[in-house]
Amino acid sequence: MRVETLRFRGLAAAALVAFAGVVGFLLAGTAANGATHSSGTVSLRSTKLGKVLVNSHGRTLYLFMKDRNGHSSCTGQCATFWPPLISATKPTAGTGVKASLLGWTKRSDGKMQVTYNKHPLYTFANDKASGQVAGENVSAFGGEWYVLNAKGAKVEPGQSTGTPTPTTTSSYTPPPPPGY
């Protein structure tokens, strides 16, 4: 009887480990998918490009120039690198954002993607922390990617978003004309 008890305990322990593994796998999948989900709140945050749109976790939001008529053109592998901002509830305007520019668009998978000024919004997988803007002016998946300002317009490289940035002045004296 002692052998049967040990065998039962061994099977029970193995079943518990297997169950924990399945739960861990499911939770990991949920966490990976969670990168595209947000409360739907869009705010402004200061970055090296000035004030740009961010999600509720402070992650920079991007527009994809290939998107047309307010609909996403980024699916499959594209959405892996550029996760869409998905929200099950109506998007809300955070600090510095106009609620009238917020909206939704239905993706090909039926999920609702947050839009701003009719641009579907995305984060970038290579932005590892809030406030990073590594996706600015990147050309990938058939189009260019840009951060957005408070007006919902793309921020071009070197363009100000209205946030004052420190400037340095230097004196430049052009060379004299040839033969002078």
Image (cartoon, rainbow, N blue to C red):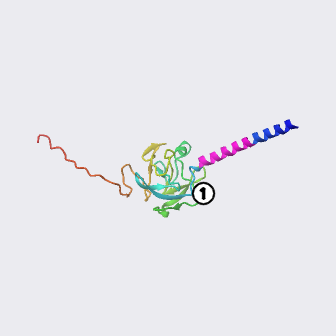
In the rendered image, the vertical position of residue 75 relative to residue 7, given as above or below = below
| Amino acid of disc 1 | Ala
Task: Pick the quarter of the image with the C terminus.
Answer: top left
What residue is pinned by disc 1?
A: 88
Magenta-colored stretch includes residue 20:
yes
Question: Residue shown at 78%/41% (left/top)?
Answer: 12
Residue situated in front as seen by the camera: 50 or 154: 50
Q: Magenta residues?
A: 16-33
Residue 15 vs residue 90: left or right? right
Question: Residue shown at 14%/40% (left/top)?
Answer: 178
Q: Residue furthest front?
A: 2
Report x, y in % for residue 35: 56, 49
Report x, y in % for residue 145: 45, 47
The secondary element bearing badge 1 is classed as: loop
Label tally: 1
In the rendered image, the vertical position of residue 100 relative to residue 8, given as above or below = below
Residue 11 vs residue 180: left or right? right
Q: Quadrant of residue 5?
A: top right
Question: Residue shown at 63%/48% (left/top)?
Answer: 30
Q: Residue furthest left?
A: 180
Report x, y in % for residue 11: 79, 39
Q: Main secondary structure of the magenta part?
A: helix
In the rendered image, the vertical position of residue 150 relative to residue 15, given as above or below = below
Magenta-colored stretch includes residue 121:
no
Residue 90 vs residue 118: left or right? right
Report x, y in % for residue 96: 45, 62
Q: Residue furthest right?
A: 1
Task: Give the class, few, some or many, for how many residues have Cα within 10 Å of label 1's Cα (few <14, many ≥20).
Answer: some
Residue situated in front as seen by the camera: 110 or 114: 114
Question: Residue shown at 80%/40% (left/top)?
Answer: 9
Task: Pick the quarter of the image with the N terminus.
Answer: top right
